[in-house]
Image (spheres, helix red, strand yellow):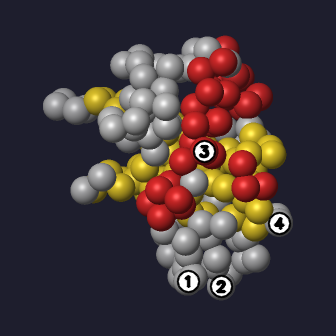
Amino acid sequence: MTSRSIYTGIPQTSLYHAGWSVHFPLHMREVTQYYNMENYTEFYDSHPEVFIVMKNVLIIKGLKVDTNYSNSDILNVNGSSGPSGEGMYFRICQYKGLTEGQYNVIKSIFPIKNLPGGYSAMLHSISDFDYDEDRAWQPSVSFSFYKGGKNILNHSKKGFGQ
């Protein structure tokens, strides 16, 4: 799947394997070493109130988003990793490309500040609808959580979030 970064306009690609996703610019080949990273599933399980608030904000702004299969009050997310660091992504529930209006709404929502626990959600990238011969991927929005100016899912030796 190929899309363009909303910040740089650089073509990006995503790798999907066993339920996880990695977003990175096509020209980037360096792998950053991470340590002391809070696992996104641990954060998701221990902070459901954050994802309830995020889901409500997205719905109020007119976006239909994927919800947790066992609790429809909670936004469903998966892990992502890219040049902006470790994060998560959620899906927009539609099998067509995003409109310019939808892009603008998504960009206007972030950052989502003052979430429960003092977290802020910062936008990493937006990937549009894509398909190949036998699969289709709904649009997705990649983001991470920050507290005290640091990405809490990304504690890198090389700077981002440090």
| Residue tagged 2 | 157
Residue 25, percent from left and from top = 54, 55
The local crowd at label 4, few if under 14, some if 14 to 19, many if 20 or more residues have their Cα within 10 Å, is: few
Q: Nearer the viewer, residue 91 or 69?
A: 69
Q: Nearer the viewer, mark 2 or mark 4?
A: 4
The local crowd at label 1, few if under 14, some if 14 to 19, many if 20 or more residues have their Cα within 10 Å, is: few
Q: Nearer the viewer, residue 9 or 74?
A: 74
Q: CA distance from mark 3 to mark 2?
A: 30 Å
Residue 91 lies, with reference to residue 44, above or below; the image says: above
The amino acid at mark 4 is Gly
Taking the spot 35% from the left edge, 55% from the top edge, the residue there is 20
Q: CA distance from mark 1 to mark 2?
A: 8 Å
| Residue tagged 4 | 148
The local crowd at label 2, few if under 14, some if 14 to 19, many if 20 or more residues have their Cα within 10 Å, is: few
| Residue 35 - label | 1
The amino acid at mark 3 is Glu
Secondary structure found at label 4: loop
Taking the spot 40% from the left edge, 53% from the top edge, the residue there is 21
Q: CA distance from mark 2 to mark 4?
A: 18 Å
Q: Nearer the viewer, mark 1 or mark 2?
A: 1
Q: Nearer the viewer, residue 98 or 30?
A: 98
